[in-house]
Image: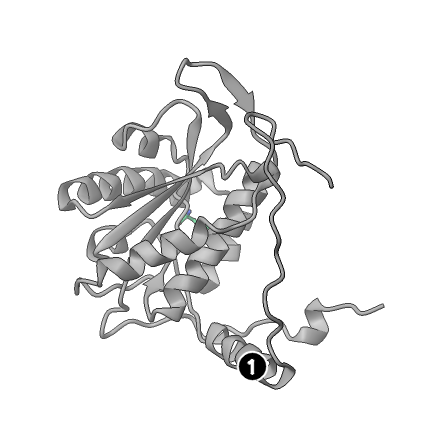
Amino acid sequence: MTTWMPLHGHPYTPIPYHPNRIPVEEALAKSAAFRARMDERRTVRMFSTDPVPEQLVLDAIAVANTAPSGAHQQPWTFVLVEDPEVRAKIRAAAEAEEQISYNGRLGEEWLSALRPLGTDEHKPHLTDAPYLLVVFQQRFGLRPDGTTYKHYYGDESVGIAVGMLLSALHISGLAALTHTPSPMKFLGEVLNRPRNEKAFAVVPIGYPADDSVVPDLVRKTMDQVLIRI
Ligand code: IYR
């Protein structure tokens, strides 16, 4: 029997894993329903201030925490911000950065790529949405004694976790936005994060505003994205 040796701890004991196979008919029905439901997901920028059940957000974070990660290092920290003062601080700092970005820093090619989406430096969602989830990537491991160790595939791992988070939020009827103010250094400062963590994304979570609109965009077809050999 093989024993897997985590880099920074004890070997994991292999345990049986043989979940029941889902009968094909049932799997096809579930798969089709999930596909259709996911196709309804839209990135939302106009949020209602209505409260959302906290448990739905906690469940979605718990789902994200099931994501696969390089060497099972789970290099993520989720900071859930409800405090209106902290949200206001984050909005002010993000808008200050975005002001610079949209007025030259992004460059003409980037700005013209964004133009169809209609985004700008105003970020009301940061204070309208009842929750801001700030996802941090642990660039390296930090032991309590201050020594460090490498993390592997951090970008990929946190990206997968955020994807699972967005899916879980959507399944619960919640809307979200993957917002990446740039540079994001201020988030570590405002939220008092340790030196090994860098902000990966800010995810406002809530219900869409009653007058919310989204761009009438079209997704690539399967023919465009799938090559079969
Ligand atoms: N971070 C900026 C700009 C921005 C960049 C991309 I790429 C987007 O898909 C959307 C926005 C902002 O949040 O406005």
Residue ID at (51%, 75%): 34
Q: Position of residue 107 (x, y in %)?
A: 51, 43
Q: Position of residue 225 (x, y in %)?
A: 69, 67
For the residue pair 117 and 161, the one nearer the viewer reads as 161
Q: Is residue 87 above or below residue 227?
A: above
Secondary structure of the residue carrying tag 1 is: helix
For the residue pair 33 and 186, the one nearer the viewer reads as 33
For the residue pair 11 and 56, the one nearer the viewer reads as 11
Q: Which part of the image, by quadrant, shows the N terminus? A: top right
Q: Report if the beta carbon of the residue with label 1 is closer than 8 angstroms to ligand 1.
A: no
Residue ID at (62%, 81%): 23
Badge 1 crowding class, 10 Å Cα cut-off, few under 14, some 14 to 19, many 20 or more, is: few
Residue ID at (61%, 86%): 25
Q: Which part of the image, by quadrant, shows the C terminus? A: bottom right
Q: Position of residue 154 (x, y in %)?
A: 55, 37
Q: Is residue 214 left or right of residue 112?
A: left
The quarter of the displayed image where residue 212 is located: bottom left
Q: Position of residue 4 (x, y in %)?
A: 66, 36
Residue ID at (44%, 20%): 143
Which residue corresponds to mark 1?
32
* Amino acid found under the numbered disc labelled 1: Ala
Q: Is residue 222 left or right of residue 78?
A: right
Q: Residue furthest right?
A: 229
